[in-house]
Image (cartoon, grey):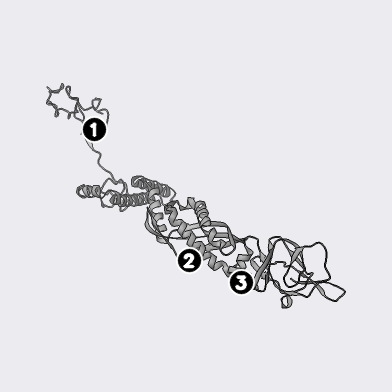
Amino acid sequence: MGILDRVNPFNQFIEVIEWLDDSSNTMLYRFPVQDQEIKNGAKLTVRESQAAVFVFQGQVADVFGPGMYTIDGGNTPILSKIGAWKYGFNSPFKSEVYFVNTKQFTDLKWGTMNPVMMRDADFGMVRLRAFGIYTIRISDPRAFIKEVAGTNAHFETENIEGQLKRSLVSGFTDALGEAKIPALDLAASYDELSKIARDKLREEFATFGIELTKFFVENISLPPEVEAAMDKRTSMGVLGDAQRYAQFQAADAMRDAAQNPSGGAGLGAGLGAGFAVGGAMANAMGSMNQPQQQQQQGGAAASAPGVKCPKCGANNTGASKFCNECGAKLEVAAETVPCVKCGAELRAGAKFCGECGAKQEKPKCPNCQAEAAPGAKFCNECGTKMDNAG
């Protein structure tokens, strides 16, 4: 740190004052001068990203930026740019020399120790947590020594980080409240919040002789219970239509059953499980989204006749195609209608009669074009006599 240099004819020393910083977090260092006596003719070396502060009789005498200086004076220090060595000098004077590190101190971390209360349009009152990094530098060595470091011989970033973090959290909370950004949109506004908070805090940091050069918000998070509710809401949105989900479950069951070496029994069980899960999911979604419709359909579903399984004899309600108990295929009687011409029993939806070949179209009223039942003699809507009536 301190170096003694050449000896003059009077056996007195020319002192060299300099500081080589081998740390990454030292903000201020007091040069160790014996009895605070600095000899006239001493050399002062101030490197880039440094400032040397002379404190004489308890007051800041002067601040020197990067360069090389010689000391020549009597009762008070008078420093000038070095031009030539001065070996004849008066008695030494007492002064303290502080080296201030003016580089940027990067990757300093900040975060909210307690949640920040915020009023949100979507969730009401929410508690947010946030963290990030910031960068500072000493912009005013005089103010820094007067307001922060004092007479400390060695001052590091950790000695002031607590104060700075509390100021940062306070400024960030204020900026967050003023911005009134919805919680779901905060991730897209980190840069804007960082800039607002940095502008608000610069003046406060300046009172310490420090400049807040960078301020970044890395993450803003919601409470775990709110995030869990958001995940459920997202899952429901991805799920979509309950009917399609049931079909998807059945398709998966068929695929898995086809890969099952147990054969048809496995296929039937897989299909039954798929329809059971899909049906349960559809009922649950229907009860959430359409409670009144579910109640109206409940009585009709209860009174609907069941289909008896031909294999195990279990009664299956609804339009199931496979038994809910054993997975066997259910033989459901197809609905039939009479032929419009010959009256033969036809499958519902048939376009032509299998007996007479007549096209299956319901007769229409020649007056109002309303559809009439096969064999009707008069229109049910306007009373007009039908053409095919005898």
Helix, strand or loop at disc 3?
loop
Image height of 237 relative to 80, above or below: above
Residue named by callout 2:
113
Residue holding disc 1: 346
Amino acid type at image mark 3: Gly
Alpha-carbon span between mark 1 and mark 2: 77 Å
The CA distance from mark 3 to mark 1 is 104 Å
Residue 371, percent from left and from top = 19, 28
Q: Residue 73: which quarter of the image?
A: bottom right
* Of residues 339 and 210, the one drawn nearer to the viewer in this rendering: 210
- In the picture, measured across the screen, residue 385 lies left or right of residue 206, that is left
Where disc 1 sits, the SS reads strand
Residue 173, label in figure: none
Which amino acid, by three-letter code, is at mark 1?
A: Leu
Q: Quadrant of the C terminus?
A: top left
Marker count (numbered): 3
Q: For label 1, count other residues whose C-alpha is less than 10 Å away and answer few (under 14), some (14-19) or many (20+).
A: many
Q: Which residue is mark 3?
A: 150
Callout 2: SS: loop
Residue 247 in which image quadrant = top left
The answer to whether any part of residue 327 appears in the image is no
The tag earlier along the polypeptide, 2 or 3, is 2
